Amino acid sequence: MTPLTSCLLLSALLFVIGLAGALIRRNAIVVLIGIELMLNAANLNFIAFWRYGPNSEALTGMMFVIFSIAVAAAEAAVGLALIISLYRHIKTANIDEVVSMSG
Amino acid sequence: MLFTIFAILTLAGAVAAISLRNLVHSVLALTLAFAGLAAVYLLLGAQFIGLAQILVYIGAVAILIVFAILLIREAEPASPSMVVSSWVGSVVAVLVIFGTMAWAIERSAITQRATGSQAEASMQQIGNALMLRFALPLEIIGLLLTAALIGAVTIALREKGEGR
Amino acid sequence: MILAPPNTAAETADQIFVILRDWIVRHVPGGLQPIFSDLISVVAILAVFASLFAITTVLERKGLGRIQNRYGPNRVGPFGLLQPLADGIKALTKENIVPLAADQTVYVLAPVVLVVAAFSMYAVLPIGRNMALTNLDAGVLFFFAASSVMELSVFMAGWSSRNKYSLLGAMRAIAQMISYEVPLILASVTVIMAAGSLSTVTIVEKQAGYTGILPHWFILTPWGFAGFVLFMIATIAESNRSPFDLPEGESEIIAGYFTEYSGFKFALFFLGEYIGLFAMSGLGITLFLGGWGAPLSFLTWVPSYIWFFAKLLTLIAVFIWLRGTLPRLRMDQLMNFAWKFMLPMALINLVTVGVWEFLPHGVLRWLVCSVMVVVPYVLLGRGLMQGWKVERRVYKFAE
Amino acid sequence: MLGEGIAKGLVETARNFFGSYFIKDRLTTVQYPEERLPQAEAARNFPFLVYDGDDWLAGLRCVSCQICEKECPPKCIYIEKSKDKKPDAIGKPQFYPTVFNIDVSVCMSCQICVEVCPFEAIKMDNDFELSTDDRFCGLLWDRHRLALPNSHYQKIHPTDAAVSDAILAEDKAKVDAKAKAAVENKASAATPSVAHVDPGGSSTQ
């Protein structure tokens, strides 16, 4: 297994773990944690391709990760603000109970 | 060798983060996953990214999540089930996605022809790239962060007439 | 790294520890040499700063005592100098209590995380010429990454104790640390801009020259002075020391996040807090006070590490002095100070550095930059003090 | 301006710090076991039993009337009355305490025993170093341990002691006068030879 393959496999595993967390768990915060994990998996992919791919001196992958980390921070802030707001309205962070628009 | 250790650490942290019942525990496991990932970045020669990962994810995002958990007072949810009602379908979907990705990685030609160039990014290069070639994205990210900051404050602010 | 043999006696004295380490390392089989070299440095750092912690505790208590018209500890050993030993024995022999309701794993892990994070900051601190453990390209970033982990350990301690005071203390501490981390990093960014490097070793080298007898330290510029003051205020707040000691305000929330800790774990918290303070002060010295450089050009023969520790002890003395002088702030005052004074000042300071770098050398840039620092200070200070009524307090029932 | 008050405060504490090495007023601590402040005359901590003369047992003023035992708010005094009598400070035959115990750990230094004692027999001592490592016997003081000579009382509380001595002297004078009158009455009533045998004679005067 080449180093790139192992990096990509780790990233894929991380992604599906995050996806599973986002899809399966009922708590909104765990869903957010899952999303963070998925973003991190994507970051790992960028770094791996920057490191083992061609044109590494252009730093494109690295820059992508820097911006992605910034976006992830913003996303976490807004996401948590949404969860807190949601909790304040319906007193729960359980996404199964947020059904007021499902008819 | 080191890569394997850090990969296992990361995956263990990630699995614990989404499977533990206690939310604070799962955030602490998440920081473990972040730290493992930062170590992997350092191993791959991305020093700046690895340290930024620790600074932003452990120092800011994890703390933010923890604060949110404490604010909504649901560290240990009382509900008997941790999973959504439609979890079977989700598991199948997740497995299918992983299968597809693993298959793609295994079969892809790009992994075979990876050059493995040893070029490391110095801080000088990163700074130059950020200030010259990527100056516009940097500005936009700054704008985005400001917008997110204001947005988050606006959303989380107590609405009028909602006082306790 | 193996260096060329030194030429003069002064140089030998300067490099004595490096020479000693290399001499020991030479007696180790080849493959283990790099690991062994690092190991010796790590052990030396641990020993030196742990004993500095011990000395500081007794100096602090004696200094505070003198400020408050009393002797400090003077019973154990000559002048009470063996007091830390007695304290250590006491801490080690005390019962190790873990509250029944506490989250055992997290509770035990929290002090360990704190101490590890605090000590890891020293990895990039140049405490003498050729005496930095590693010369990371992103040294300052590493430093702040390590210090941000300390916040996590504070939360772990506060949450796992299952005590409302612990939790309140942890919330306060984290809110305070996050608020003051912003001006702390912004104040450091000024130096990073001026030096053009994130490596601590390079930053020290950039301040090595002399004009006349005065050194090229960054503190001797308008923006550097402002940055240094901001940095130090933020450092005090980051390490939860008086007057920013709300998280552990004894009169309000017992001891904050380590209320439930006793014996050795409490000692670890204490150690971690002081080690963090020393590390932050060390970074302040590195960034603004020329690191291990001599303060005057004719004093360069004194070994570099002596200068570093002299500066560190001076800063510690100032911390003790401040602790003996200032009362604790209120939470709203704390937050107002961080966001309405420190942050704008740090941002203005950032602009000042840019102006300083662009203007030609001479009186003009001194004048412009001084004005750019002083005017916002006066205006922001006035804004901060708006609504204050400073008048003589009238005691209703006394007299 | 912002920081002015901080600077003023810093100057003050710095003056305190350096002044403590030179100026006595800036370092007011007394190093207790080695140095002691003189105690105020009114200082009191724990009662003691006054005795006159040299023999503590014979000279005890206490007549075991047990008023102090009854009045003591925390009930820390325990007295057993004697079966026989002996002459007290002013020469009257009185009971004396065979047991007189005070529990140090219970006593609250209220001085009520002193206030109620009609015989000037119990007074307050100013010794405050009563701690001991023997928490049973060491804290229950018996009459021997409680007994202190009048000279000690005169030394620690001279003013109060003078008052107390005056009262006793007055009482004694009264008793003596009464005895003299009794003797004279007897002398006038009975044969004069009896007066020489009477033990209550005014030998001191």
Image (cartoon, coloured by chain):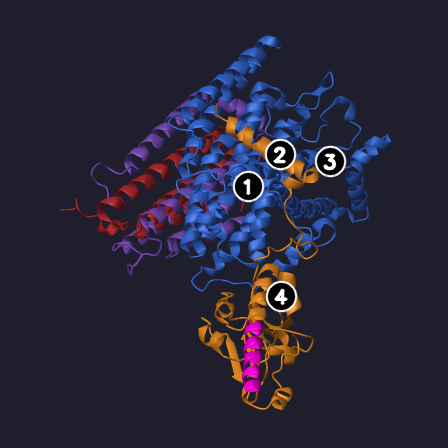
Chain colours: A red, B purple, C blue, D orange
Pointer 3 and pointer 1 on the same chain: yes
> Is residue C30 toward the left or the right of residue C393 in the image?
right
Q: Residue at x 48, y 21 (%)?
A: C377
The answer for how far apart the CA atoms under marks 4 and 3 are is 66 Å
Question: Magenta includes C46?
Answer: no
Q: Assess disc 1: are there few (<14), some (14-19) or many (≥20) residues with their C-alpha within 10 Å of its C-alpha.
A: many
Closer mark to the observer between disc 3 and disc 2? 2
Question: Of label 3 and label 1, which has the lower sequence position?
Answer: 1
Dot 2 falls on a residue whose secondary structure is helix
Question: What amino acid type should be assigned to the residue bearing mark 3?
Answer: Tyr
What is the chain identity of the residue bearing mark 3? C
Task: Look at the magenta stretch and give its main secondary structure.
Answer: helix
Residue C146, labelled with which disc? Answer: 1
Q: CA distance from mark 3 to mark 1?
A: 23 Å
Which mark is drawn over residue C305? 3
Q: For the residues labelled 4 and 3, say whether their Cβ atoms are less than 8 Å apart.
A: no
Is C254 above or below relative to D141? above
The chain letter under disc 2 is D
**Depicted D64 relative to depicted A90: above or below:** below
Q: Quadrant of the C terminus of chain C?
A: top left
Q: Secondary structure at mark 4?
A: helix
x and y percentages locating residue C8 in the rendered image:
86, 30
